Amino acid sequence: MGFFSSLDIGASGLTAQRVRMDIISQNIANVNTTRTEDGTPYRRKDVLFEERTGSFSDVLAAASDKLSNGQGVRVTKIVEDTSEFKKVYDPGHPDADEDGYVNMPNVDVVTEMVNMISASRSYEANVTSINATKSMAMKALEIGK
């Protein structure tokens, strides 16, 4: 693994976690949205990651060397959570049905906060790895003095 590839891996992790935090904050912001543009309550969204792979020649070279050092992660898709909406009895709400129940978004604030803490810790870990790589490079340059 080269010096710049370790920086690329850390940077890809930072980008992926930033997207994850954006989606989590969007979920929290819409926890009380009962009507979206399509007329349904807001559906919780989630981010899917996958390992980034290189070009065919990179994969072929890694396979021939039996070394797969990875190239970071990337966001592949943002998916909607298909779980049921929460029903809340509120007959005075403008979106209430004939029985007085309102479909609320399937967002659980506690779950979103746990996911936000996890994303924040992952972001910090990527920053730490980039700083460690940078520190090693600086020490290597000092050897040449």
Image (cartoon, rainbow, N blue to C red):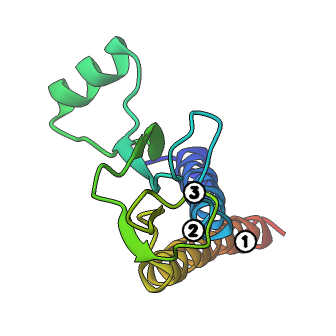
Q: Is residue 123 above or below residue 73?
A: below
- Callout 3: few (<14), some (14-19), or many (20+) C-alpha neighbours within 10 Å? some
Measured from the top left, where is residue 95 in percent x and y? 57, 57
Q: Is residue 51 left or right of residue 62?
A: right
Q: Which of 37 and 17 is in front in this view?
A: 37
Q: Nearer the viewer, residue 36 or 96?
A: 96
**Residue projecting furthest to the right:** 145
The alpha-carbon separation of the residues under discs 3 and 1 comes to 69 Å
State which quarter of the image contains the C terminus. Answer: bottom right
- Callout 2: few (<14), some (14-19), or many (20+) C-alpha neighbours within 10 Å? many
Q: Which of 9 and 25 is in front in this view?
A: 25
Looking at the picture, which amino acid does disc 1 mark?
A: Ile
Residue 143's disc number: 1
Looking at the picture, which amino acid does disc 2 mark?
A: Asn
According to the picture, the residue beneath numbered tag 2 turns out to be 126
The residue located at (61%, 50%) in the rendering is 35
**Tag 3 secondary structure:** loop
The alpha-carbon separation of the residues under discs 1 and 2 comes to 26 Å
The residue located at (54%, 56%) in the rendering is 13
The alpha-carbon separation of the residues under discs 2 and 3 comes to 44 Å
The number of numbered badges drawn on the structure is 3
According to the picture, the residue beneath numbered tag 3 turns out to be 95
Looking at the picture, which amino acid does disc 3 mark?
A: Asp
The residue located at (68%, 67%) in the rendering is 29
Q: Which comes before the other along the chain, label 2 or label 3?
A: 3
Q: In which quarter of the image is residue 126?
A: bottom right
Tag in front: 3 or 1: 3
